[in-house]
């Protein structure tokens, strides 16, 4: 299965109605294609509080367009179902009360078919609005439409993360997609690229005249950087097994204090979804089912705590997000992303001094998720999108094998709590030069 919506930044810098409508329709169709392999029962399961049912993702992304665009723009618009505002609000306090996140799996009604009708109703209304609204209205809703499209793309990745976790909890380990042979190529050798120190600029100024970016990606600002070296590729499963065999999960000297406590209490001995079927014989569970751990593929589904411990064990450290962005400045945004259709990390190929910056796995950094100098959240409910989460989380960069290809930028800041492992996240090492 492969999805290839051909969207570029031309879409948002040149605010053509036809381009925005095309991106909206393609994004909605990708979500529908992603749930095609799932039964109604699959779509309702919630395997942990951090995850959401696939049906909820479908409804919530629809609720976003209805709540922030249709209900505020169309004077005569009647919500599809007044109860949906409570059921499918995620965390927007300004909108009102909502169903508890940890209980989304209890929502057997509305059904998956009901949500399909809801999606069709809102998609049709959005299309009519784009075609028929005045230029004044269009100028106001265009940024919200582009935000809603990017929001749905985020949930496409979350949907795949969440269904993988749900299937992993099923004893028969169902496969989201049919299994395919793993890549038998060998990973490139680990080398280092030196980057100079000095004053650099990172981030992006977010204005109505620039291509789309989330508010947390700006403002653009100066940073002082010491010289550093960055690994040419991400850490492989082979290297992670060396960490395991050297009792990396049993040696507290490599771990942050909170990480050690977490690893001990959760009983971590390997990345999430790994299983030692016999001594030294590892397998992993993925969207294409259970398969042997292929040694030269990037390690995936590790937490920030594990990534930091591995880096300490290796005598290195995780890069800062500033170091990562400096390395990415002259690199194309291409790689093993969702449109590629692999649905798993791939072996690196030696084509660039620094490879795999985009796709395969999100890369943990040692940077806390905090506001850039001069950051100011937008007013109103949409201001809750990013700013209120800028505490106690860590930044990840680069995208993964299930990130929509048109969704990324070199300034994109993903963020998760340090203990979380179900995202497609891996490790790139850095060192002081």
Image (cartoon, rainbow, N blue to C red):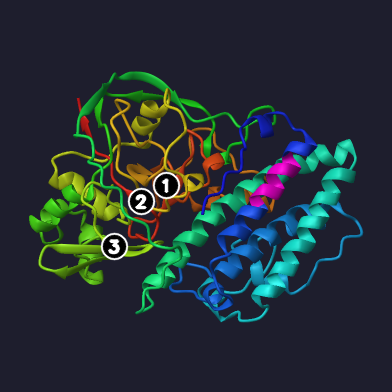
Classify residue 322 by image quadrant: top left
Q: First in sequence, mark 1 or 2: give its number.
A: 1
Name the residue rendered at 69%, 60% in the picture.
Answer: 62
Q: First in sequence, mark 3 or 2: give its number.
A: 3
Q: Comparing marks 1 and 3, which lies closer to the viewer?
A: 3
Disc 1 + disc 2, Cβ < 8 Å? yes
Q: Which mark is residue 425?
A: 2
SS label for mark 2: strand
Q: Which residue is mark 1?
A: 400
SS label for mark 3: strand
The magenta segment is 20-27
Name the residue rendered at 49%, 48% in the picture.
Answer: 338
Q: Which residue is mark 3?
A: 291
Q: Is residue 256 above or below residue 410?
A: below
Q: In the image shown, does 2 or 412 lie closer to the viewer? A: 2
Give the CA distance from mark 1 to mark 2: 7 Å
Position of residue 371 measured from the top left corner of the image (x, y, whole percent): 48, 40
Q: First in sequence, mark 1 or 3: give its number.
A: 3
Q: Which mark is residue 369?
A: none
Classify residue 18 by image quadrant: top right
Q: Comparing marks 1 and 2, which lies closer to the viewer?
A: 1
Name the residue rendered at 39%, 45% in the picture.
Answer: 396
Q: How many residues crowd mark 1 within 10 Å: few (<14), some (14–19), many (20+)?
A: many
Q: In the image shown, does 213 or 38 lie closer to the viewer? A: 38
Dominant secondary structure (helix, strand or loop) of the stretch shown in magenta: helix
């Amino acid at each position: 299965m492969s999805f290839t919506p051909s969207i570029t930044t031309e879409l948002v810098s040149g605010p053509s109605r036809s381009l925005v409508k095309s991106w909206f329709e393609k994004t909605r169709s990708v979500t529908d294609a992603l749930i095609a392999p799932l039964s109604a029962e699959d779509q309702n399961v919630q395997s942990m509080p951090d995850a959401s049912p696939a049906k909820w993702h479908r409804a919530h992304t629809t609720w976003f367009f209805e709540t922030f665009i249709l209900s505020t723009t169309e004077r005569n618009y009647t919500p599809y179902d007044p109860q949906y505002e409570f059921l499918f609000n995620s965390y927007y306090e300004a909108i009102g009360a909502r169903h508890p996140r940890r209980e989304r799996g209890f929502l057997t009604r509305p059904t998956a078919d009901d949500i399909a009708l809801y999606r069709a109703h809102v998609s049709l209304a959005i299309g009519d609005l784009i075609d028929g609204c005045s230029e004044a209205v269009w100028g106001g809703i265009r940024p919200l439409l582009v935000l809603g499209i990017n929001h749905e793309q985020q949930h496409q990745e979350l949907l795949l993360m969440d269904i993988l976790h749900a299937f992993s909890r099923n004893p028969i380990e169902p496969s989201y997609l049919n299994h395919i042979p793993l890549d038998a190529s060998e990973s490139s050798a680990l080398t280092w690229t030196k980057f100079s120190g000095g004053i650099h600029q990172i981030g992006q100024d977010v204005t109505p005249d620039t291509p789309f970016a989330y508010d947390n990606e700006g403002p653009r600002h100066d940073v002082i950087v010491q010289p550093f070296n960055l690994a040419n590729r991400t850490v492989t499963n082979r290297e992670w097994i060396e960490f395991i065999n050297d009792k990396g999960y049993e040696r507290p000297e490599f771990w942050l204090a909170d990480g050690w406590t977490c690893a001990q209490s959760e009983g971590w001995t390997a990345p999430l979804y790994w299983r030692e079927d016999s001594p030294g014989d590892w397998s992993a569970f993925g969207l294409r089912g259970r398969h042997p751990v292929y040694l030269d593929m990037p390690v995936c589904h590790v937490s920030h705590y594990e990534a930091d411990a591995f880096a300490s064990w290796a005598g290195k450290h995780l890069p800062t997000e500033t170091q990562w962005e400096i390395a990415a400045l002259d690199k194309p945004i291409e790689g093993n992303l969702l449109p590629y259709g692999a649905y798993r990390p791939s072996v690196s190929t030696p084509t660039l001094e620094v490879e795999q910056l985009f796709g395969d796995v999100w890369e943990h950094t040692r940077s806390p998720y905090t506001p850039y100098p001069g950051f100011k959240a937008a007013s109103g409910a949409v201001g809750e999108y990013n700013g209120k989460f800028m505490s106690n989380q860590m930044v990840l960069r680069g995208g993964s094998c299930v990130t929509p290809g048109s969704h990324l930028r070199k300034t994109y800041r993903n963020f998760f709590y340090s203990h979380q492992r179900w995202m497609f996240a891996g490790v790139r090492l850095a060192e002081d030069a």
